[in-house]
Amino acid sequence: MKISKHSAEHYIWGGNCDGWHLVKNQDVSVIHECMPPNTSETRHYHQHARQFFFALSGTATIEVDGKEIILHPQEGVEVPPLMPHQMFNKSNDNVEFLVISQPTSKGDRVLVD
């Protein structure tokens, strides 16, 4: 069955960021996310999920284990389980990206101070 962000289950996170579940099952999750300018998620790690963040548009900044990585469109980074990370949009434009998690990250998130 064909899916797009226009037909996928939508949710809001962080107050004003959007997410669309493109694939949502226990084995793998694919989410299309959009972060408005000057937003960020909470620093965290996952106990079991391995994640891959892939920029679609805009310039994203992701901090992985204390190191900042700039992602331009068509660039990505893998984050293994237990690795603290945090996504930022430090730009003046929306950032859209895919988050692919294996297994799903639902219920697997641990916040880091």
Image (cartoon, grey):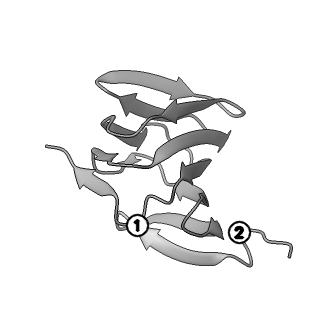
Instruction: Report the side of 40 relative to 103 (left or right).
Output: left
Measured in 3D between alpha carbons, the distance from the residue under mark 1 to the one under mark 2, in whole angstroms, is 16 Å
Identify the element where label 1 is drawn: strand
Q: Give the amino acid type for the residue marked by disc 1 in the picture.
A: Trp
- Give neighbour class at mark 1: few <14, some 14-19, many 20+ (Cα, 10 Å): few
Q: Position of residue 87 (x, y in %)?
A: 41, 42
Q: Give the amino acid type for the residue marked by disc 2 in the picture.
A: Lys
> If the image is split into quadrants, where does the N terminus sit?
bottom right
Instruction: Report the side of 31 relative to 36 (left or right).
Output: right
Q: Quadrant of residue 54?
A: top right
The residue positioned 56% from the left and 40% from the top of the image is 52
The residue positioned 34% from the left and 66% from the top of the image is 107
The residue positioned 77% from the left and 69% from the top of the image is 4
- Give neighbour class at mark 2: few <14, some 14-19, many 20+ (Cα, 10 Å): some
> If the image is split into quadrants, where does the C terminus sit?
top left
| Sooner in the amino-acid sequence: mark 1 or mark 2 | 2
Q: Position of residue 40 (x, y in %)?
A: 36, 48
Q: Quadrant of residue 106?
A: bottom left
Specify whether residue 57 is in view: no
Identify the element where label 2 is drawn: loop
In the rendered structure, are the residues bearing label 1 and label 2 in contact, judged by CB atoms less than 8 Å apart? no
- Give the farthest residue toward the left: 113
Instruction: Report the side of 50 relative to 108 (left or right).
Output: right
Q: Position of residue 6 (x, y in %)?
A: 74, 75
Label 2: which residue? 5
- The label shown at residue 13 is 1
Q: Quadrant of residue 16?
A: bottom left
- Give the farthest residue toward the right: 2
Q: Position of residue 104 (x, y in %)?
A: 50, 60
The residue positioned 48% from the left and 43% from the top of the image is 50
Q: Is residue 36 above or below residue 72?
A: below
